[in-house]
Every structure is written in structure tokens, then in C-alpha cells.
Image: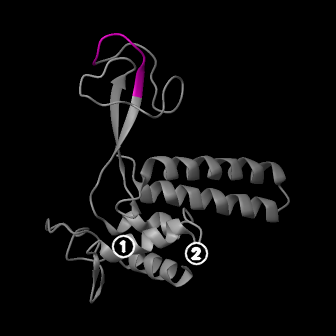
Amino acid sequence: VVPADLCALLLKTATHIADFARACGDECVAQRFEAEATRLHAAIDDLMWCEEDGCWHDLLLLHTRRGADEDGFAPGTASGGGAGSSGSGGSGGTGGEQVWGVQQIRRTYASNWVPLWCGCAAPGSQRAAGAVAGLARSGLLQAAGVLTSLYETGEQWDAPNAWAPLQHMLVEVRLQT
């Protein structure tokens, strides 16, 4: 699983490091982390954003081989030498290059909106408005705050519980949009 909130926090961290490096006069480091932030932002946007739900979903990594689609999955992501690629050989399929594909995990968690707090949508943008609308219709907003999830599993990270840092992030981002 590739968590949307973790990826967004890495984006925010890369942005902060770039800003800090620039303030310290290290333009080389600033440019390197700006490039990383740009790469992360594009990946989060392309792979995790769900227009229908108005949020960013975690990803499930799916291992397959190029040209071998045993499960009906068409990989559309990292391949050949990129992250997650492991060359030829290994398990599953017949022939072809191994690649990693992704599938969004379409479940509802408050953490699906952490990317909004991390700058994955500019304040006032259509994406930000779509995310705020998605949160409003998610069922997570309750009288006492935002549920961590819609699922009552008995675990501390699920309904009916809330998590203070998520409350802070979501209230702060709502004030910005």
C-alpha cells in the first residue's frame, strides 16, 4: 500500500527543505528538492486523485509483467528501470518485463484529505473546491469533529474515533480554501 497522506507529507517536506535551503543560500539543494517536490506532486495528482470522490486515495501496488495480464489488470505506471521495476525473472506470468501497476483503494478515511493540507491543490482552485466538497459529502463530518474513517472495526484508528492532528489539518485547510 502506498498511502496518499504519507506521499503528500513527503511532498510538503521536500517543499520545506527547498525553501530552507534557499534561505540558507544553497541553491543547488533548493533546486534538487524543488524537482523532487514537482515529481511527487505530479505522481500524487496522476495516480491518487479521484474526481468522483473528491479526494486522494491510497494505492495498492500490483505486480505483473509487461505483456502478461493474468488478472485483467492493465499496468499504467512505473516500468523498465523505474521505482518498483525488478527487471526480468521472478514470479508470475510468462515472459515479459516485470512492472508495478497501481490501483486506488476506494475507501473513506480522513487521511484522504491530508494532501489538501500539504499543498496538492492550490487554495481557491477547482481541485481544492472539489476536495472540500468531497469531504463534505464523505460522511466523515460529525457533530464532534471529523471521524478517522467510516468503518467501525473496534480499532483506535477507525470510527467512531477522531485523531487530533487530522482535525487540525482539515480545519486549517478549510480556513485557507
Left or right side of 66 for 159: left
Residue 55 lies left or right of residue 14; in this view the side is left
Spot occupied by residue 21 in the image (x, y as percentages of width and height): 77, 59
147 or 106, nearer to the observer: 106
Residue 97 colored in magenta in the image = yes
Instruction: Write the residue at 25% across / 75% down.
Output: 139
Relative to 63, say whether 102 is above or below.
Answer: below
Q: Quadrant of residue 18?
A: bottom right
Q: Nearer the viewer, residue 89 or 58?
A: 58
x%, y% of residue 87? 46, 18
Q: Nearer the viewer, residue 78 or 134?
A: 134
Q: Quadrant of residue 56?
A: bottom left
**Which residue shows up at 30% across the image and 50% down it?**
105
Q: Secondary structure at mark 2?
A: loop
| Disc nearer the start of the sequence (2/1) | 2
The disc at residue 151 is: none
Dot 2 amino acid type = Gly
Residue under numbered circle 1: 135
Q: Which residue is mark 2?
A: 124
Residues at discs 2 and 1 in contact (Cβ within 8 Å): no
Which segment did they paint magenta?
A: 92-99
**Crowdedness near tag 1: few (<14), some (14–19) or many (≥20) residues, C-alpha within 10 Å:** many
Q: Is 171 situated left or right of 152 in this image? A: right
Local crowd size for mark 2, using a 10 Å CA cut-off: few (<14), some (14–19), many (≥20): few
* Three-letter amino acid code of the residue under disc 1: Leu
Q: Quadrant of the C terminus?
A: bottom right
Structure colour scheme: one colour
| Numbered disc in front, either 2 or 1 | 2
* Rendered location of residue 29, percent (x, y): 76, 50
